[in-house]
Amino acid sequence: MGDSAVITQEPDHFASARWLSSQLHTRDDSNIKLNYTIGGLSPVTQGVSHKASAPSVYQGSILISGPASRVNDLGHRSSPWTIVGCNSSPDLINGQTVLAYCSSTNPKVKCAGVFVGGAKNTIITLPATCGAPFGRIVTLVPTSTSKLPRSVLAQLGRSAKDVSVFTLKFDYNYENIPYKSGDAKVNFAIDIGTLHGGVNPTSVSKRSDSDLQIQKRSDHDKEKDIKVEKEIKYILADVHEKKKGVKVDLKATVEGKFEGSLAFGYHITGTIIPPKLKQHSALMKSDSSISAKLSLTGLAKYTFPKKDVKVVPKTGLPGFSVPGLITLDPFVEADLKFSGDIDLNGSAVASTFATLPSIELSIGDSGLKKPTIKGVESGGLKVTQHLDLSATLKMDLEPKLAIGIKVLKKVVDAEIALVPNFALIAKGEVELGDGPISAINPCIELDGKLALGYEISGKMGGWGAPKSGDFWSLKEPLYKKCLQKPTPTTTIVSHTPTTTTTTTTTATPSPTTTTTTTTTTTTTTTTTTTTVPPTPTNPPCAAAGGDTALMDTCGFYMDGTVVTGFCQNLSCDTTTSTIDLNNYIGNNNGILTFGGSDFIATCSIDWLHGPALQAECQDSITGTTVTANIDISSNIGNINGMLTYIASNN
């Protein structure tokens, strides 16, 4: 009796299973190959992409091969089997329960082939309506034809009485298929990616089985990059308050934009039964650019709490999944790290832009490849007028462009990531206003650091231990501007003789004698204007503790809670300023700064150093800084409570 005779009558639940098993156990357990084309013209590609509504950027192929006792093309369009009631959004844990019926009057069509070796744990193909190309049979048991939907019965018409109907339960838990030494194996090979022709590292070219070669398709002649564009905006501080009588206003924001493209290829071979890898390689290509702007405005002395925030949360990109077999999960995210101190009165904007190098990351037999560098562009720093700024700030913007990979649920669970790092480091001090630039002669600097790193982490499946590092990095000043003190001009007038002739006739009492005297005088006046440094006209001021080799002497002394700072030049000209430590009222909200246009150095006292005051004197020309401390609690310090320090003559 042929196969058709078995399935043209309604089978008894148990008898049919025993009969099928007895009839089929002697059949040839030939090798069966299940093919699935990704991104091609095959109708079974529908509903597999991560977002069904979006065009798939992936292409490639999947091959599963094994004996008929392990593999069956039950759901293929050429199969006599029909599956009814599938959900295109599969339950990845529990799978689905559907109806399957087989109708054929041709005994050569082997409807009963799925029962070779028992239907349970057979890997089968599924139609596009099931949301996955493959599944594992959990149970396949006969049921009544009446269970079929009316629309199907109407379509079958009179032939409905000749079909055999089964309840089919399937899932994607291939790891639950039992295996013991000596059992038949099921092989698989996957080539997938956005790259034309899939991934082609050295290991792939060594494949011996021609069935593993990617099918060439004319509709995929170009790479289909995954595009990424993310705006970044974050408020670092927004402080408006009064603190012990002092008003603090500060708003600090960071804005940026990350743009990039990602191309990816992946190749893997091995066995599903048992779950084991043979070949495993990936290729990742990326181009990206990044821009950032740091804006500061307000009137405040502020220490930023160390921030490490995810300014772009983990956001999925178009991915790919064959449930239970492989999942590619690209994503982008960005971290912002910020720290530093600022003393601000005004506003400043630091901005820059960079195009990062192209990168090609190859993992597998061909190892890691060095990137090719396209170049780097950088912007600058904009400083507004009416600004007092003293800052040491560091901002790190770190996007991550990554792909998560899962194969056979537990065999591979890895993540490959390209991690650009973009740091802005602002430092310096500036005072600008309507009047002449003061003598502090400051510089504002903006240093930039760019790096392009990689991370390979997770369960690597043959790639060894997790890896990370930088392919490329650059650190350089992006901007520097120094405000020079105007150099005075001095007019020098010199005198040299000029020749004149005067004739004097003197009459003497003697009528016969006359004396003539000629006097010659030469006078030359020349006016020369030249630029020279100012020179003190008086000797050093001994009261200030000065030195003939030094231009300025600065110091401070305490009277109770009041600190008075002074700065004297060699002409004994003195400038002073005070601050009351008891209520923080004084110069510049807690920092005492004194000096003036006649002084080369500007000095400051910062009381925010625990029990000690720290005084600082900075040479405006060289930037050299001298500091000294005094302990408030014990009045022990420089000169028994009076701290004096001296600026250089450079």
Image: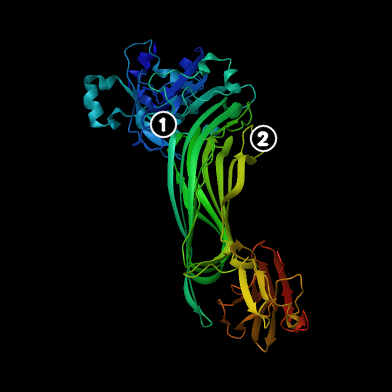
Label pair 1/2, CB-CB below 8 angstroms: no
Answer left or right for 499 relative to 640.
Answer: left
Could you say which is closer to the camera, residue 532 or residue 305? 532
Residue positioned 57% across, 32% down in the render: 372
Mark 1 surroundings within 10 Å by alpha-carbon count, few (fewer than 14), some (14 through 19), many (20 or more): many
Residue at the image point whose x is 44% and y is 31% from the top: 139
**Residue at the bottom extreme, as displayed:** 560
Q: Secondary structure at mark 1?
A: loop
What label sits on residue 57 in the rendered view? 1
Q: Is residue 417 above or below residue 527?
A: above
Residue furthest front in the image: 512
Closer to the N terminus: mark 1 or mark 2? 1
Q: Quadrant of residue 570?
A: bottom right
Instruction: Name the residue nearer the viewer: 123 or 503.
Output: 503
Mark seen at residue 28:
none
Q: Is 632 above or below relative to 101?
A: below
Across and down, in percent, residue 379 comes to 50, 48
User: What is the secondary structure assignment of the residue under circle 2?
Assistant: loop
Q: Which residue type carries mark 1? A: Val
Q: Which amino acid type is shown beneath numbered disc 2?
A: Gly
Separation of residues labelled 1 and 2 (CA atoms): 29 Å
- Res. 502 visible in picture: yes
Q: Is residue 197 above or below residue 541?
A: above
Of the two numbered discs 1 and 2 in the rendering, the one whose residue sits closer to the viewer: 1
Looking at the figure, which quarter contains the N terminus? top left
Q: Where does residue 425 sit, x and y in percent of width and height? A: 58, 55
User: Residue 97 vs residue 153: left or right?
Assistant: right
Residue visible at 38% across and 27% down? 45
Q: Nearer the viewer, residue 601 or 603?
A: 601
Q: Is residue 274 visible?
A: no
Q: Which residue is mark 2?
A: 464
